[in-house]
Image (cartoon, rainbow, N blue to C red):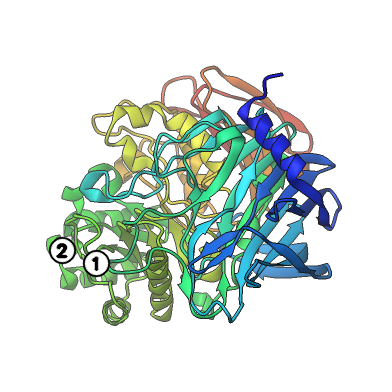
Amino acid sequence: MKLSVGMAITLSLAVQTSMAASGLSSPDKHIQVRVNLTAGHTLVYSAYRDQQAVILPSGLGLQLEGADLKNQLHLAATSKIKRVTDSYEMQVGKRRHNHYEANEQTYSVVNAQHQKMDVVFRVSNDGVAFRYVVADPSIRHKKVTQEFTSFAFEPAAKAWLQPIAVAQTGWSNVNPSYEEHYQMEIPVGTVSPSKAGWVFPALFNVKDNWVVLSEANMDGSYHASRLQAESVGGVYKIGAPMAAEVYTGGALMAETDGVLSSPWRIIGLGSLATIMESNLGTDLAAPAIAIDPHLIKPGHSSWSWALLKDNATIYSVQKKFIDYAADMHWDYTLIDADWDKKIGYEKIKELVEYADTKHIGILLWYNSSGSWNTTRYSPKSQLLTHAQRMTEFARLREMGVKGVKIDFFAGDGKSMIDYYISILKDAAENGLLVNFHGATLPRGWERTYPNLMSMEAVRGLEFTTFTQQDEDAVPTHAAMLPFARNIFDPMDFTPMVFSDIPKIKRTTKNGFELAESVLFLSGIQHFAETAEGMASVPDYVKQFLQELPRSWDDTKFVAGFPGKYVVLARRSGDAWYVAGINAEESDKALTIDLSFIGNKQGRLMTDGQAERTFDQQPLPSEKAVTITIKTHGGFAAVFQ
């Protein structure tokens, strides 16, 4: 009998594994984790849903300088199981009021040198999380050199993964920035096209089970992780950032003289609806810092750069975009790169004062970079130190600026993660909202730092203005994003164009574009469309966008499949907003159950018969309804 590589690895692990040290179940008993010490004295875990193996026996362990915490391990203690509960509120995300409940158990192991490590597991009704804690005082300086965490899937499983670009590549050496296209429904074990690996969140399907892998609780003391490029036999291993992904002169890997705690490794697990409605990414993040809640104002913003680019960053154009935002009943106008050269601080102050008369807040762009890339856009290198930030942020606060968009970060090294955190803290102290671009994944920061409105970390709309190839990929790309990139964290895709994109042939219908305003989650939604383009849509579409909620009280997954189509429902107060898009090459008739909305009469806005037109019709909610979504089209409905 000839064994495949995946079968050989699975059988090898099964032979090595001794009896389970313990089994830890979710509160509802549907999910279970088993942690085992193998005959070879290594630690492995596996995860099950309704007795079906989803994560096969997978490795655990750390290598520190001077401490091998992977090999020759012995189980020193297993704690009693304890119930963990947490409730919290967020204005940025799929749900305002959140409740987390899990069972927790700690497994303490020692190596041959009697050096100790704890592995803390939590199992909730929507997944599994674990983290490493090394507090042993005999290891005086704890520096991570390698992590041995893995996630093993059966060979028949499928994956939806985004490669991460190699550091110091791309325009002006700005990579990596989580801005690649997804590889969809690929066999597990497929090698990444980038040697740097795959980003989180990573999505997998195993029979009736869906899995999303990510991490959370990044406090600046640890580097961010990813999945390695190679996954032989469907075994995905944690990967580390590349050497260049650091703040100049800063640390790459986690190190401390105190207690070393890794981020939570997250395994969202369940039906597709379960993981789509899960908030594990914020459930496992640290609680919010102290901040004036009146400063946290999600909203909608006008933005000239998306379609008009650099030449529009001038006083007269920005004034028109302030008027446009006011006409749309929006909240902000974003003024992009080189405003300091093309407009200047004094004239920006005039724009801020003008905007204030129309109840519009001004957001300003900054270049984060010091020497880690060759970008020239400004203001540049003004936020590198605490002293610089406090001076600049205080100036902005005194001018009345509401927030900053900061671009061009260097990746995922420990010092770069600490740079993000330091910016968020200093901005919070000065009452400024933050949006990071050319950036990493937030990993739950929107809970810990409520002033974080959004982060890019996506191949957003701006790429469609550069090449036809990127525009052609939009339908499937947009239908993928709610299932991975946007599943836990806000995403600044900068959606929605109803008119032309200069020099590009649009591939999506206007109903598709309108649906993005509901489907994509972002604390501040920066809409790409201009006033001229907005003038081309019916009054009822404009009214819909004028009244669109700034934050959501709840979210429900209605239907979908990654990269093909998606329908989501979001609630604000007593009103429900339902939106869907179809990325497939033929019209799609969907029968969807809207009875959860209650007895409300809705109105449906979808694509008309002619190109770039809309149609409006009534839509009941008390029973199943059939909606036909045109190819590359979409819809939005509101029930009030």
Calculate the distance from the C-alpha at mark 2 to the C-alpha at mark 1.
10 Å
Q: Dots 2 and 1: beta carbons under 8 Å?
A: yes
- Chain-order first, disc 2 or disc 1: 2
Percent across and percent down for residue 246 are: 34, 62
Q: Nearer the viewer, residue 319 or 339?
A: 339
Residue 343, numbered circle: 2
Q: Can residue 186 be spotted in the picture?
A: yes
Left or right side of 17 for 302: left
Whether residue 620 is visible here, answered yes or no, is no
Query: Hey, what amino acid is under mark 1?
Result: Leu
Residue shown at 53% from the left, 61% from the top: 63
- Circle number at residue 638: none
Q: From what the image shows, is residue 424 above or below residue 454?
A: below
Q: Amino acid at mark 2?
A: Ile
Q: Quadrant of residue 343?
A: bottom left
- Left or right: where does residue 242 sit relative to residue 60? left
Of discs 2 and 1, which sits in the foreground? 2
Residue at the location (34% across, 34% down)? Answer: 499
On the image, the x and y values in percent for residue 594 come to 74, 38
Above or below 39: residue 56: above
Q: Residues within 10 Å of mark 2 (few under 14, many from 20)?
A: some
Q: Secondary structure at mark 2?
A: loop
Q: Element type at marker 1?
A: helix
Q: Nearer the viewer, residue 404 or 534?
A: 404
* Residue 230 placement, left or right of 99: left
**Mark 1 burial class by Cα count in 10 Å: few <14, some 14-19, many 20+:** many
| Circle number at residue 351 | 1
Place of residue 29 in the rendered image (x, y in percent of width and height, measured from the top left): 86, 52
Look at the image and tell me in which quarter the N terminus lies: top right
What is the quadrant of residue 6 in the picture? top right
